[in-house]
Image: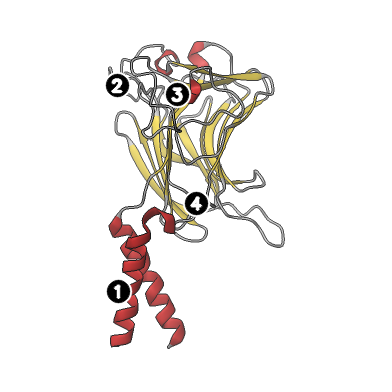
Amino acid sequence: MQKGLIAVIAAVVVCLSFGGSAWASNAADDNASSYAYNPGWNNGSNGGFGFGAWVLSANGGNHFIWDSTKNGDALDNGIVGGVAGDGDINTTLGPSPDIAPYPPANVTVPRSWGMWNGGGVTDAIRPFTGGPLGLGQHFQVDFDNGFLGTGATVGIGLYNAANQPLWEVYFVGGGAFYVNNDLAGPAPTTVPYGDEGLHVDFMLTGPVAYTMTLTRRDGNTQTINGSLINPGGANPDRNIAEFRAFDVSNVNDDPHHFYINSLAVPEPSSWMLAVIGLVGALMIRRRKV
């Protein structure tokens, strides 16, 4: 018993000592106000820290930097799922530290990453670095769908290195609720449509298990527990290697533009590291018994 307790304590100390480096994916943070996007949002752009460079494909659309309050009813009024005067998902200050030697930028101009598509699929992919998302790690992002034509789809997801979807959340024009897509298939959430933006907080809770909280700007929220999509094949790759945002067959005008912002893989807290250390030590001890 004493040896088992010592092993548990040692595991906790190791986890606390290594901090974020003990996790598979590097801590990361970026937003549209970073210095790197002063010339625009382009393929290969890489602001903030911890993420790989953007991989952008237009396919009949475009990528740009603009004010997310301009989509939907073009007002920051809080009428449809928002809070008046909150700027929707805009930022005015880049993350700190931004990629050296550049400081945070755009301290006064509200900005988000925007995209549109006129009949195909416009993509924006951002790889994680250091490895795939690890057990207990969070990924966070804001998105603002604005108005959508019937059948048009905008959303975000987490994918493996082969660009296969493992989890997605999106909205389809003409629908009433946001849709969560995982192993169980696409299913409506209880969060109704809003034109002013949402916050998504995804956490990997097991090798293929997750918990996700979807929060509309006015506080309407839902937490979903599920399993990652199985891509199929003999050895399906269910490691989360990248983030993807997509705009499918939408309309090119201000009300229908799709925006994302504020991507982050936060540093894990000390108590979470301790918990993971305890679990790992107990599993090791159980194998030896």
Q: Residue 280: where, in percent of width, then height? A: 41, 71
The residue at the point 57 percent across, 35 percent down is: 53
Residue 69 is left or right of residue 124, and the answer is: left
Instruction: Count numbered badges in the picture.
Output: 4
Name which of mark 3 and mark 1 comes first in the sequence. 1
Name which of mark 3 and mark 2 comes first in the sequence. 3
Residue 142 seen in render: no
Name which of mark 4 and mark 1 comes first in the sequence. 1
The residue type indicated by label 2 comes to Asp
Picture quarter with the C terminus = bottom left
Which residue position holds label 4? 133
The residue at the point 38 percent across, 22 percent down is: 90
The residue type indicated by label 4 comes to Leu
Helix, strand, or loop for circle 2? Answer: loop
Q: Say which of 129 and 68 sits in front.
A: 129
Q: Residue 32: where, in percent of width, then height? A: 45, 25
Which label number is shown at residue 86? 2
Picture quarter with the N terminus = bottom left
The residue type indicated by label 1 comes to Ile
Name which of mark 3 and mark 4 comes first in the sequence. 3
Labelled pair 4, 2 in contact (Cβ < 8 Å): no
Which residue position holds label 3? 35
**Mark 4 → mark 2, Cα distance in angstroms:** 31 Å
Labelled pair 3, 2 in contact (Cβ < 8 Å): no
Which residue position holds label 1? 9
